[in-house]
Amino acid sequence: MKKSKILVTGLSGLIGGLVGRNFAEDHDVTALGRSEVTGFPTTVVDIGDGIDGILPALEGVDTVVHMAASRGRVTDDTHMKANITGVYNLFEACRIAGVKRIVAASTGAVVAGYEKDDPIKSLVHNPDYEMPSPRPMLTADTPIRPTSMYSVSKMFTENLGRMYAEQHNMSIICIRIGKVEIEDVPLNIRNASVWCSHRDILQMIDKAVHAPEDLKFAIVFACSDNPTRYRDIEYARETLGFLPQDSAADHGF
């Protein structure tokens, strides 16, 4: 008998696809998105269009893993519909349907602005840079420095999640995901600092889905244990038991 029922948004994408196939081994996994996902029961709906179309997909669902988002060089209106209006519609539908937990993708890019200044600028761009002591490290409490409307919109997910956790007694865990690549290797020196392997992002999301019920809200960074990593993963270890298995050093970075 399979365990709980998990709804995954963005299952047609890279991370959502990894997550869906992983959980399908011992969970009842369904999809929600703008097109059918081969191999998974799919509710075809644009979450930016309203709550009513989302609600049927949540029947009997214990956990929603929200990996869908508008990314890249698109109009601000597109980010608004998918990452703000759509996220609100999804969270409100989850509240109405009695979903116990939402694991939502945020982005580590909410602090990417720190890469414009030293010491982090040299840390991520200069291979000969000597690591200072103490090592520079940004935590979830570090003030944000977003560099795009995409990362700004992801702050809405985090803030909305905190509100729903506190006001509606839901459990919301937001993951500030690093660079997850199709080929599962860092693409360059800079990305090696924030790279997250397939194995490590799957572990992080699995830990979040199965975190203790009394964990009502958390924001965690998801990166592999890279030599030039500047985003904190200690809190994720303490809170979720996340222990990365991979490092950019394994690929020569």
Image (cartoon, grey):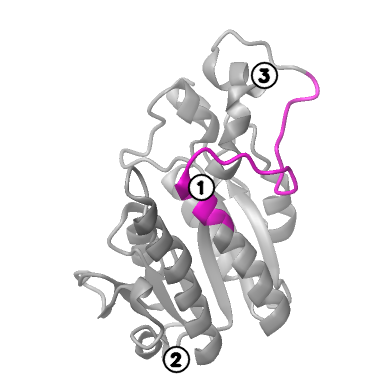
Which amino acid does the dot numbered 1 rest on?
A: Ser
Q: State the SS at label 1.
A: helix
Residue placed under numbered mark 3 in the picture: 118
- Residue 149 is one of the magenta-drawn residues: yes
Q: Residue at x 37, y 39 (%)?
A: 184
Residue placed under numbered mark 2 in the picture: 60
Would residue 231 be found to the left or right of residue 149 on screen?
Answer: right
Marked residue nearer the N-terminal end (2 or 1): 2
Q: Residue at x 69, y 68 (%)?
A: 217
Marked residue nearer the N-terminal end (3 or 1): 3
Q: Residue at x 57, y 31 (%)?
A: 226
Residue 104 x/y as whole percent: 52, 64
Query: From mark 3 to mark 1, how far is it between C-alphas?
Result: 21 Å
Residue placed under numbered mark 1 in the picture: 151
Mark 2 nearby-residue class (10 Å; few <14, some 14–19, many ≥20): some
Q: In the current view of this chain or complex, which residue is farthest to the top?
A: 128
Q: Decide: is 32 above or below 190.
A: below
Q: State the SS at label 2.
A: loop
Camera-nearest label, 2 or 3: 3
Q: Decide: is 19 above or below 186.
A: below
